[in-house]
Structures are given as structure tokens and as C-alpha cells.
Image (cartoon, grey):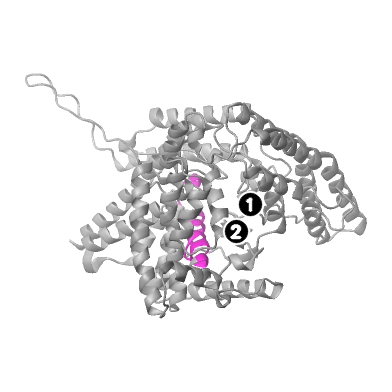
Amino acid sequence: MKKFDLRMAIWAAATALALGLAACGKESAPVQATPTAEEIKSESARLNAFFAEVFERDVKRSPIFQTYLGRKDDYDKLDDISEARQDEDIALVRQDLDRLHKEFDVAKLDADAALSYKIFEHLAKDEIEGDRWRHHDYTVNQMFGWHTDIPALLITAHGVASVADAEAYISRLNAMKEFFGEVAKGLRLRAEKGVIPPQFVFPMTLEQSRNVITGRPFDKGPADSPFLEDIKTKVGALDITPQEKERLIAAAESALKNSVKPGYDAVIAALLDIQPKATADDGVWKLPDGADFYAYQLRHYTTTNMTAEELHDLGLREVARIHQEMEAIKTKVGFNGSLQDFFKFVTTDDRFFYPNTDAGRQAYMDLTVKLLDEIKGRLDEMFITKPKADVIVKRVEAFRESGSATAFYQQPAMDGSRPGIYYENLSDMRQMPKNTLPALVYHEAIPGHHMQIAIAQELQGIPEFRKVADFTAYIEGWGLYAELLPKEIGLYQDPYDDFGRLSYEIWRAARLVVDTGIHAKRWTRQQTIDYLVQNTPFPVGDITREVERYIVYPGQATAYKIGMLKFLTLREKARQELGDRFDIRAYHDTVLKGGALPLTVLEEVVNDWVASVKQSAS
């Protein structure tokens, strides 16, 4: 369900050679000799060449992925998302996995190549298993989908530094009629198979789609539509003649009217046709083979074999534990009343909010920058390796504010041409309390997602696919772990800020409860909202929006807490085994410098590091 899952697929565990002796009295089976250093070097190089071949092939098959990588090879094209192309994609993955097993000898790989083998194998097997559920996703929903991803691609990632870049932008606009025709086909195909989003999804996705084709040149104003505003700004900044600018803008307007409009109209028509068939049932248990689908989603996102019941019970225990820490802060600040009363206080009292004005929004963004500058100055206490790419703060664009997350991160271009972007949804400042901002910044930017993803992209000497591998439990687990790290070096001095941190931690713990509640225990939307209102300090509007996210994104929300607990558990185990030799900076180097990993592989990496530290000290 992540944006580049189709492109990035492929990896998992290397198997040991089984060497046995024949029965007594018979000749022993030949024992394979230990590979020489030259054999290891050669086999590892061959494997890395294979990875490079597959990665470049997959990049060439996805113009959109090329753009996010900072490449302009097919800057004028969009992806082919047809069923036939998806059949080709999965056939290639099967072919890649077969080649991996038949053409390479795990026993002759160096440590880095063996790790790459495991990751590639895991990804390939997961994608092959996931293809069974190709049509079980809600491909257009209020949280994500091509209807908002394509505007985001052109507006945020398609830079225009030349006339050729502008013409490529316009070519992409001209490709949208066909592209969104395929999106509409996909919606109808899913509906035929009984995969229809819940009722609440339709009004929001229809609004988002209509927003893209509202304004000039689709109507008489008063404002430009999002695409026209963007292309005017980008073309206006070019050092070309006014006549050339006018030509480009006219071409863009023609593409908007003749391609973008009919493309979005096709999606809107499909949504309107399907909408009457939608029900109020929210969990994927309602889908064909829904229980099996959800079990796959949990394996995919957590990279564990934990069942829905196990995740649910763990969530209940974690919620109870964090409530105790919250009670301690309530007592510390001298608040009289129940924990639920305290929840209401911190989510409604004016002291915790900036005004819902442009000045208030700017003050919030200014505080964000201040927090980023502060944590950047403390990184040496926690890290050896730090990213070269910068991260900047932006407000979520108006066209996608409705339904958008409170905050999110977009990775930098791999070639360094574009920084990481930390987005804040400032449409309603009552949804953006000051006391949760530190944890939000630490999670999404530094030392969270930007730190982890930028370091991965900048790694040298590892296959490119590992720099962009997408393991939610690792990536989001690191983000949640990163919320805690600043507390361990003395930040969160304001107890209300620390309560904000706990607010996000309990939110992730409660996700274990409600995601499994919705999709395995058949909780209703209202039942889920009521649980979160009772147990977490967030306003009902925010809770409702998040519950609606979990409904359309089954399993994803469970990965955060599972990943965080793995980082903490491995760290504590390493600390106990190494004693005075444990170095938190070296631990972070170990877990970050391999890129994102399945949690099972992450544990192997940390265990190997602990063993190497012990050996070096002996």
C-alpha cells in the first residue's frame, strides 16, 4: 500500500548448507571447501550486479519513481498502471526470485551481500504473496490514491528548470486522460469483486477529485486551479521571453481542459456509480477472504507472524502502562481531576493552541524551525553518522488538506537536488496543539524519518534498492523511537511537552487495539472512536480522521508500536550483554547504516554487532 511497493519489491533469509555424513560403512559425501577470499569477492560482485540490473529495470518501468529519485529520463510520462502491466510486473518479480535462488551461492557471499540477499528475498516473497490481494485495496480513498498522488507529484516533485522541463510537465498533463481512465477501470473492477470502500469515503474522495478541476481554466474563477497555479509559477520563474511563457501556459491550459478534466471526470463518474453499493461496515472482514487478507496485511506491515489477537492484547497492556506515566505527569503539574478530565484540559485549553489565523500558523511553523535547530545541535550526543540532505518545513497545500494527515514527511531526491520536506496540515489550528509539536517534529523530521531515510539514501557501497526499501515496522518504529530519544538527553523539560510525547506513544499503542478491533473483531466506526476518546488525549475530530485512516489502510497502523518495541528491546539486550562497552551512538550506527530492514533481519544485524564488539574486546 505504500507508494513504491510495486517498484521496490524483493528479499529474505539465507539458508545454511546441509552437510551430512553417509551411514557407517559407506563413503562420506563430499564436503564443500571453504570459499576463498577471491571466490567471495567474485560471487558478491555478481550478486550486486544482479541487484543493480533489477533496480535499474524497475526504475525504467516507472517514470513516477524516476521523478522521486531526482531523475529526468522519462520526465514527460506517467506510469502504466494497467492490469496487463501489473501482470508483467509480478512475473518479473517471480523471475527475479527464481534467478536469485538458482544463480547465486549464499555460502560464497560476504556479510553485506548476504544481508542484501535476505532483504531482496523477503521483499520478493512478500510481493508475490501480496499479488493475491491486488484488488483488495481501496485504490482511491481520502488518505491516499492516484487522484491526490499525481497532483502532489507534479506540484511538489516535478521541478521546472528549463523549457524542456515545462514541456514535460505539460506532456504529463496530456497523459492524464488515459492514466485516470485506468484508475476508473480499477475502481470498477474492484467493485465487481466486492471490494468497495465504506460509505464515509465517497464524499471526501469526490471532494478531493473535484478540487483538482475547480478554478481556471475549468471554470471562470476567481482563482486558478492547483495545476494551473503551479505551472504559471514555475514557468514564470524561467528566464525566457514573455511570448514563450504565454505559449507554455496556453499549452498547459489546453491539456488541463482536454486531458485532466476528462480523466478526473472518469474517476468521479466511477465513484458516483459505485457509491450506492457502499455499506457502513468498516472492517476488511467484510471483503472476500477478508480474514486471510488481514492476516497478510499484518505480516506485511509488522514483518512478524504476530496474530491479530496477540497484537490486540499487547496494545491493551501498553495502553494501561502509559496511562500510569500520564497519571504521574498529571500529579506533577498539580491538576485535580481524573485522567479523562486532564485529557479534556490539554485538548481544549487555549494555552495549548495558536490562534486559527495566518499569524498563528506562522508562529507554529516558526516553533517547528526552532525545535529542528535545537535538536540538530544535539545530534552528536546520539549519532555518529548524520545525513547530508537538509529538511525543510512546508504547509500542506490547500487542494489536499481535507483528509490529509496532521503531519507527514517526503524524502529528499536521491541525487541531492531536493531536500526532505516536513509537511504540516494547518487547516485547523485547534487540531495542532503546541505541546505535541516537539514529538511530532522528532518523529517526522529529526531524529526520525528524515534522519533514517536520508542516511539510507546516502549510504555508499550497498545496492540501490536497499536505500529505498520500505519496511513500515522499521521506518515507523524508528520514528516512534525517535520521539523518545530527545527525552533521554534532557529535552521535553516542560511536563506538558512530555505529556504530548506520551500522547503520541499511547496513540500508537491504542492503534494495536483499534486496528485489530476494526478488521478482526468487527468493531464499528463509532465503537472505535469511543475507545480512543476514552483512552487517549485527542479531540474527537482528530480521532475520527485517524479512525477513518485505519479503516482504509488495514494493518499499517500496527507497525509503529511493534517497530519501536523492537528497537528498544534490541538496545536493552545489547546494553546488558556489553555493559560498559555499550555505546548508544554505535548502536544507532548499526541499526541505521543498513537501511530499512525486516525486524527479524534487524535482530540478526544487532546480534552480529554485539558479537563483534565482544570479540574485539577479548
Q: Secondary structure at mark 2?
A: loop
Q: Quadrant of the C terminus?
A: bottom left
The type of residue carrying mark 1 is Gly
Seen in the picture, residue 2 relative to 429 is either above or below; the reply is above
Name the residue located 39 percent from the left edge and 27 percent from the top edge: 102
Instruction: Answer with the quarter of the image where residue 23 lies.
Output: top left
Q: Which residue is mark 1?
A: 70
Marks 1 and 2 close (CB-CB < 8 Å): yes
Name the residue located 41 percent from the left edge and 68 percent from the top edge: 339
Could you tell me if residue 41 is visible in this image? Answer: no
Q: Which residues are magenta?
A: 440-465
- Residue neighbourhood size for the residue with mark 2, other residues' Cα within 10 Å, grouped as few (<14), some (14–19), many (≥20): some
The type of residue carrying mark 2 is Gly
Dominant secondary structure of the magenta stretch?
helix
Q: Secondary structure at mark 1?
A: loop
Q: Position of residue 5 (x, y in %)?
A: 53, 41
Towards the viewer: 530 or 261:
530
